[in-house]
Amino acid sequence: MGHKHLSDSHSLCVKYEFLKRSTYQEAYRNFCEMLSWKAGENANRAHPTKKHAKSRKPNEINPEIDSDSEKFKEKKLKTCKEFNVAEVIKLYENYHKEEFRRMGRPYSYKTADCLGLLLLNNACGVAEHLTNTRFPMNRVIVSRAYGKVKVQMHDPSKPCQNAEYWRCENSGCIIWRGYHARMDESTRFQQMASADLGFILNFAKLDELEYRTEDYNPWNPNVDPFFNFVRYMERDYDTFENSIFATKITMELGWFGNSDEDNNRQVELLWKWLNNRNLESMKFRKWTGSRLPEGNEVLKWEIGSSLAERHRWTHLKELDIQDRNLKMPAKNYIHCDTVHIHLETDHFLEFCDEMLETRFKKKMITFIVNEAFDFSRAKEMAKRYECYANEKYDLENDMTRFFELKEDDAQIIFYYEKQSRSRSRSRNQSTSRRQR
């Protein structure tokens, strides 16, 4: 007599898939294929067939073309009347509970670490229990490389935990979660990365969220890393909008291209989930690892009106664009308290003129400049302006607009006591001072 807990053929097959560490989708797919399989007409024939088997040709995929695209659709999960996918999910959850009890650990999503939550979600389909579960992490780094997306989850009290998604030649992908690897032939690597990122970042409360590109490896094709996973995130997770609580965002520009339109679109996609209440600081850098010639040009980025008027942007306290390859007009940061910039000493007076003509929203704005900026030369150049005893330089001869050079802190601070003067008058006064 067979064991009682193995008397059900359905549960026996699902148990086998569970012990193989298949996901619940893979288990259900394999089960349905088994039920639909039928023996051939001559399956039991003893003598060999006259037909010779032909070797299967490998899929011809151009390694320089992104295999993930908007047109690609994930294979639909095959269904069968005899068994419902909900039954597989329920059995998987019961098997996980049994396994936790045998190990003497509580079956609790709240006590699981980041990789544990990912494994539970992908293994037994319990996303409905985890929708409001916050991952135990304070920093997330999303990096891309050729044929790879990597997610690093940092917890101050534990070692960093990694999840990686690799491209395969057969159009599938390999998923690494810590030291556990799994091949999925039905999903492409950027789609899988997008799905997991949606789960990881939903309701996350972070000190920093960073997007960056790994260094180019010479053995890879001479192409830029792909970025369709960003578009998948926008397409698949509209319900998660405003669900990420992050204090600081660090982001590379130039993924989509070098134009204002390309970079505005990239920023809008990547910060779509951000909640307005927590964001205080943004750091931008120009990605200079592009294999295209135009990818290494200086990026003169002017954010579009739809982005500049967003609540997230207008409430930004700190903006870091201290990159020689990135230039931004002053009107883009009129709401900020502190701005990190790359300023050439030779362009200091031009910078002062731009500050004079710009209507800032606050009475004071602090610029933190790069180490190469020469404050001694800047003070010599600033002699065209009247200097008061407190070493503040008057831009308009009425102390309504003036600036201060603080070499020890690498700061240039501009003060605006009142905003009544027109830009044309400011421009005329600036021109007259140059002619003296």
Image (cartoon, rainbow, N blue to C red):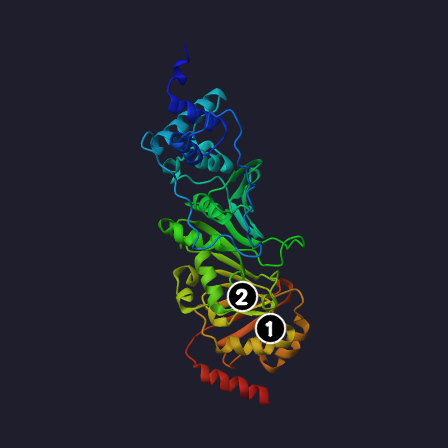
Residue furthest to the left in view is: 81
The residue lying toward the viewer, choosing from 434 and 166, is 166
- Left or right of residue 226, residue 85 in this image: left
In this rendering, the answer to whether 58 lies above or below 249 is: above
Q: Position of residue 384 (x, y in %)?
A: 60, 82
Give the residue drawn at x 42%, y 66%: 308
- Can you see residue 245? yes
Displayed quadrant of residue 340: bottom right
The residue that mark 2 highlights is 366
Residue 302 image offset from top left, x and y in percent: 48, 70
- Estimate the spatial distance between the alpha carbons at disc 1 and disc 2, rounded to whole Å: 16 Å
Local secondary structure at mark 2 = strand
The N terminus lies in quadrant: top left
Position above or below: 64 against 309: above
Query: What is the three-letter code of the residue carrying label 1?
Result: Glu
State the image coordinates of residue 192 (x, y, percent, origin top left).
47, 45
Q: Disc 1 on helix, strand or loop? A: loop
Q: Residue furthest top?
A: 1
Between residue 370 and residue 395, name the one nearer to us: 370
Q: Position of residue 359 (x, y in %)?
A: 45, 74
Q: Is residue 87 left or right of residue 320?
A: left
> What amino acid type should be assigned to the residue bearing mark 2?
Thr
- What residue is drawn where x is 39% and y is 61%? 311
Location of the C terminus by quadrant is bottom right
Q: Which residue is mark 1?
A: 391
Q: Residue at x 48, y 20 (%)?
A: 102
